[in-house]
Amino acid sequence: MTLLATIQNSDLAHPAMAWRTLYRDEPVLVISTAMLAAMMVPAFFAFLSEARTFNGINVWIKPLKFMSSAAIFLATLAIFMPFLDRADRARKSVNAAIWIISIFLILEILYITFRASRAEASHFNRDNALAIALYAWMGITILIATVLSGWIGWLILKGKEHIASPELRYAIGVGLVVGTALGSFTAIYMSTQSGHWVGGVRNDAGGSFFFGWSRTGGDLRVAHFIGLHAMQGIPLVGWLVSLVSAAAVKPAVIVSAVLWVLLTAATFAQAFAERALFPV
């Protein structure tokens, strides 16, 4: 039984069964997710015992945020993979994409963690030729991983096989494609700047709760975060609407996609205007 069949048969009421099925069908994504989640344990204890700061915050906050974000990204992709047509899932190119996405994300997290352990910047680090090259490598690999996820979303969107939840498949495909477009655009622009701050204090101390976004000026991370997480948000909207009316899913997905684009554009413009999302 595939994970999609598990979902359709409501066996997700038994999480252990769902995870066993998911591990059997998508071992690379599940193991990579588990690796990133496991990395968070020593990083968290390091955070508790560490006194050093970088850009005004504990050096281990950034690795923890990226570990959790990457783990969520890979877990999301694993859950979405069963919505591919079986012929598409059997493609060597799709299997290669899964390996590339997983390896690139883990390597990026390892590099971010290494720099954090030295209280050094990983992003926007142009201190020397090696730092510039590694920063460029980070940008290229994460862009490739994101675009490959969008490609998988496009394949899901084009799926022809009859399934119990074609509306949910539509929501997932749209979410991955829109999230790829918005996340990539905002990331490319941000990577060309000298930092994620736009005006205000160029420091992360006193940032907003949990996310750490600047409260004294614009912060390009806001639009990137919102845009990228269309990958989870739009499918979630589709799933919630499907509980009420299957016929309403596609219109709801289209509306939510449009609103997601507008919200991303609005927060991007707000940052560009040097205004904080949650000002002091």
Image (spheres, rainbow, N blue to C red):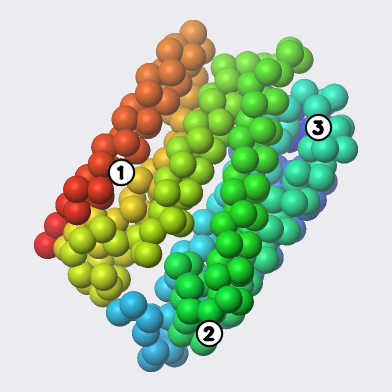
Asked if the residues shown at circle 2 and circle 3 are in contact, with their CB atoms under 8 angstroms apart, the answer is: no
Q: Position of residue 8 (x, y in %)?
A: 67, 25
Residue 25 is left or right of residue 156, and the answer is right
Q: Quadrant location of residue 280?
A: bottom left
Numbered label tally: 3
Q: CA distance from mark 2 to mark 3?
A: 39 Å
At 48% across and 79% down in the image, what residue appears? 127
Whether 96 is drawn above or below 263: the answer is: below
Pointer 2 residue: 117
At 58% across and 62% down in the image, what residue appears? 136
> Could you tell me if residue 33 is visible in this image?
no
Amino acid carrying label 3: it is Arg
Pointer 3 residue: 89
Pointer 1 residue: 268
The disc, 1 or 2, on the residue closer to the chain's N-terminal end is: 2
Neighbour class for label 3 at 10 Å: few (<14), some, many (≥20)?
A: some
Amino acid carrying label 1: it is Phe
Depth check: give the residue in front, 218 or 28.
Answer: 218
> Could you tell me if residue 114 is visible in this image?
yes
Residue 212 is left or right of residue 184, and the answer is left
Residue found at the far left of this picture: 280
Residue 258 is left or right of residue 66, and the answer is left
The disc, 2 or 3, on the residue closer to the chain's N-terminal end is: 3
- Which is in the foreground here, disc 1 or disc 2? 1
Depth check: give the residue in front, 137 or 32.
Answer: 137
Residue 64 is left or right of residue 12, and the answer is left
Q: CA distance from mark 1 to mark 3?
A: 35 Å
